Amino acid sequence: MTRRTVAEYRRHVAQLLSALDSLPAETVDLDAALGRLLAVDVTAPMDLPQFRNSQMDGYAVDSASIAAVPVELPVLQTVAAGDAGPAAFASGTAVKVMTGAPVPPGADCVVPVEDTTGSGDRVTVERSRSVGEFVREPGTDVRTGERLLRAGVLLAPRHIAVLAAVGVRTVEVRRRPRAAVITTGAELVAAGTALQPGQIYDSNGIALATSLRANGVDVTSVSRSSDDVAEFRELLTAAIEDADVVFTSGGVSMGDFEVVKDALAPLGGEFGHVAMQPGGPQGSTVVDGVPVLSFPGNPVSTLVSFEVFARPLLRRAAGLPDLAGYEVRLVDSLTSVPDRQQFLRGRRVGDTVELVSGPGSHLVAGMALADVLIDIPAEVTALEAGAHVQVQEL
Ligand SMILES: Nc1nc2c(c(=O)[nH]1)N[C@H]1C(S)=C(S)[C@@H](COP(=O)(O)OP(=O)(O)OC[C@H]3O[C@@H](n4cnc5c(N)ncnc54)[C@H](O)[C@@H]3O)O[C@H]1N2
Ligand code: MOO
């Protein structure tokens, strides 16, 4: 791989991951459907409301019988929500109804209880009402067979509410992308283990796993390999079994122990440089049909690679909204390496952005202070304070 531009490598990765946009549908329980992408149109299996019912606690009457008020009417019955419905109704009478209770045929309006006096089997109506007032007619929200929700909707509580209202218990959603993570490096140990000289804690494994989960991906495994090619291959074989894509970190540059490159280049992996900083060394391979994206090991390089190359694609596959980008003004002046698109760590303050970290790709605490990446084009080598820059939200 020659030194590609960021745009070229983005296109390359988009092609490698294109299968993620057409993952098959699966059926999930409604209470597990939050945040999932609806795979099919859903039509209403019933009317909503299903039966005529009252919008108010009050009296169902015939509007003609209360044209002149006050008027006293006999109360035939009291009907609660959940009752099957009043036995009978005749003009000139009233049925006491609660909100949601069936309104008897023949009654054409409901008088709210506030507009009445009396109790028991007599009521005095103090205010006239016209036909239809406070009566919820069947099918006025949705009719049987009408489209309730369109395929492609990202299911939010309001969508789940209407599905529940028509008695739906399961729903067809697009399967989430599945990804595995493998970190590499003889120096890596898990938190909780005392560090021996030369060792560091593995932060990229959990950084990638949580980045994936935060963007609608199911993480199938997170494993850690030494610099041994056979060990890495074994972990990769297990990882690709149930993953749509594998992310690796480390072992891709120019050292003597580049386990990822050594394992994958013989399988057709492309390893080389993208004209960016951080995140220059990048690799991509397809192993048994599964794309493997190999990010450089420096913690900021790994995270920035994910943000730039993977995150927008994964969000699209999961139906999540695109990330916000803004044009803002720099608080500080800065310099940038020639011929490298630079992604600096910044924090937005109103319509300005301040630098929160030096450019070093080991500065993981600096990355934690950032809420945006400042995108400095490859041809730019210096910018004055106040210059306009493009930022991408993290
Ligand atoms: N001679 C050259 N050396 C380097 C070049 C180069 O072009 N020529 N590129 C540099 C750049 S830029 C980067 S980025 C790194 C990428 O190297 P690798 O991807 O091979 O990564 P490693 O060497 O394995 O690790 C780099 C660095 O990051 C630490 N690391 C790795 N994995 C983790 C992890 N899971 N959690 C926390 N920290 C991790 C590792 O200890 C190293 O310090 O290469 C430069 N060198
Ligand atoms: O590309 Mo490296 O990621 O600059 O540090």
Image (cartoon, rainbow, N blue to C red):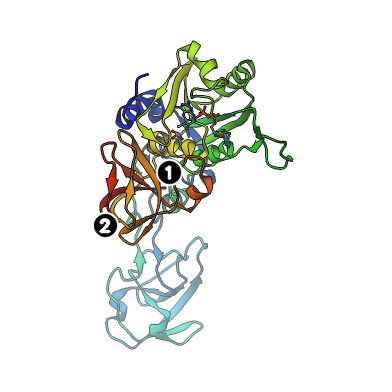
On screen, residue 164 above or below 336: below
* Residue at mark 2: C-beta within 8 A of ligand 2: no
Q: Where 123 sits versus 152, above or below?
A: below
Residue at (53% x, 29% y) in the render: 250
Which residue is located at x 70 percent, y 36 percent? Answer: 197
Which one is in front, 91 or 68? 68
Task: Determine the secondary structure under disc 1.
Answer: loop
Residue 299, horizontal then vertical, whole percent:
52, 39
Q: Position of residue 217 (x, y in %)?
A: 49, 37
Residue corresponding to mark 2: 386
Q: Which residue is mark 1?
A: 359
Q: Gap in Å between the C-alphas at discs 2 and 1?
A: 20 Å
Q: Which mark is residue 102?
A: none
Residue occupying the point 46% across, 45% down: 35
Quadrant hosting ligand 2: top left
Amino acid bearing label 2:
Gly
